Image: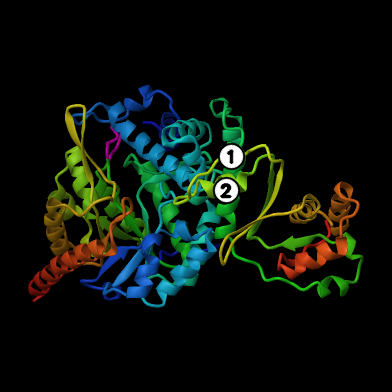
Amino acid sequence: MPKLSEVQSAVCSFIRGGPPDALAELIEHDGLAPAARLAIYRNNALITLEAALMASFPIACALTGPRFFSYAANSFIRDNLPAEPCLSEYGATFPEFLASFPACAGLPYLGDVAKLEWAIGRVIRAERGRPIPLATLAGLAGDPAERPLAVDPATRFLRSAYPVDVIWQQHRPGSVPETITIDTGAVHLQVRGADGLFIARLPEASWILRAAIADGARLGQAAGAALAVDPAFDLPGALAALFAEGLIVGLRETP
Amino acid sequence: MTVRTAPPRTARHERHPSSVGLGLRSAHIGEILARRPDIDWLEVHPENYMHHAAALASLTAVRAHYPLSLHGVALSLGSAGPIDKDHLLRLKSLVDRLDPFLVSEHLAWTATEGAHLNDLLPLPYTEETLGIVSAHIHQTQEALGRTILVENPARYLRFRHATMDEPEFLAEMVQRTGCGLLCDVSNIHVSAGNIDIDPIAYLDALPAASVGEIHLAGHTVRRVGDRTILIDDHASRVPDDVWALFADGAKRLGAPPTLIEWDADLPPLDVLLEEASKARDVLAGADGWCDAEAF
């Protein structure tokens, strides 16, 4: 008698696209070939996962068309089954997959649009943090430049060589598509959620400062990176803006 | 040394007889809050609220007006491997926050070797499986501090090495764990069509006193090879033959709280309310029948 773990391993291989042979021998015929019975489960599983990707990446789907999206999604699913129980968390690596999927080479911005969609999905689900005032920094015992800061969890930063914010906006349901020039230069985006969705383009130095802080850099390191791309960067003004916009929700311990 | 004790069974008086609930999908939350329709309770998949602060805030607002049932789909009670402890903690956190009157899961597995397949996959009904499922139900009930209901799956196949039929397995599982049963009447109908079991004999074999909830949903009829196959897709009205089986089941099972499930191709809320009203009429009839039997 096969062990349960063996049965489950065989079903999983079959859902990934493996042959049903050995597994089918464990199934009663009951008027239908065991392989056809197993295929019902495989179809149900694949339909669910494809629908989850379609729900998380509707604009990527609009860009490729649903038939191609379905092909790309199924190619992704077989080698990237969800590693987490909740379906809403599935697809974090799908943008990278799309970016490197040879059949998508004609849409060089597709992966970045998908990254923006994933970021939007995260920020609209996140619990917004409670902002702290700039004065908190002044009141610290040590050197503030040595402190990493906690950024509002309903925030993501991403940059792209393409105007993915415009592409995203113009492919939303109800939008009237216009010709988009895609070689307008890199965009540096801040995506904030909770109480609405706000996508803003930032100057490169501001973006670097904020993205580095969000990545866990110490304040001094983040400021140095921003000044490296723009020596005239108004650091005090940028720090004041960070707090005024409610982006900073706490202090992290120095690593 | 710790002494493991099974949590108490759901007592008969804790049930809400003749009560009918709706499966609540996020698209209907705004309308439910605005209209406050006459429905006894609502059921949600907890997974939809585990990583979504705004959705959880809306659900908490709903909870202020309706009793809730949490119907999990991803705990994977039937996995040969361990239960995902983080997932169980997230479920516990929702149970603590929302104080649901029912918590349920499925007699199925969805995960193996780190892959979460997100489909309710079939189990061979063997002693080994019974031991694993029972241990996972124990673990869940201890973590949550309450009993859960476990639902019979919609089946598309039978394993040759099974040593029990499904009602026998469910009865033994209830005996070992003190859990209750969620009797999905539509799943019995679907399984009966797909693997040739007798739905009435199935209902008769269930430990009726342990059934704490009934589910009803629509399915799709497909032709696969030379055979008709019923697909449990929760995307249409409850068909007449399932209503008939529900009337039989409600009498046998004591008219427990009953849910209208509709998960795909979601119709207007009024369609769900019509289905709920139909279910309420059937339950009221069955309840009368039970009372008459009691005296």
Task: Classify A217 as above or below A91.
Answer: below
The residue beneath circle 1 is A95
Image quadrant assignment for residue B46: bottom left
Magenta span: helix, strand or loop, mainly? loop
Are the residues at dot 2 and dot 1 in contact (C-beta closer than 8 Å)? yes
SS of the residue under disc 2? helix
**Residue A252 screen position, x and y as percent:** 78, 62
Q: How far is disc 2 from disc 1 in space, using C-alphas?
A: 8 Å
Q: Residue at x 84, y 59 (%)?
A: A219
User: Where are the magenta residues, as a range?
Assistant: B156-163
First along the sequence among labels 2 and 1: 1
**Residue B203 screen position, x and y as percent:** 17, 54
- Residue B280 appears anywhere in the view: yes
The residue beneath circle 2 is A118
Q: Residue at x 27, y 54 (%)?
A: B171
Image quadrant assignment for residue A217: bottom right
Q: Residue at x 17, y 39 (%)?
A: B196
**Residue B58 screen position, x and y as percent:** 46, 69
Task: Judge by depth and name the residue closer to the eye, B164 or B276.
Answer: B276
Task: Judge by depth and name the residue closer to the eye, A141 or A199.
Answer: A199
Q: Residue at x 26, y 46 (%)?
A: B166
Tell me the number on the disc at residue A46.
Answer: none
Task: Judge by depth and name the residue closer to the eye, A57 or B262.
Answer: A57
Left or right of B142 in this view: A119: right
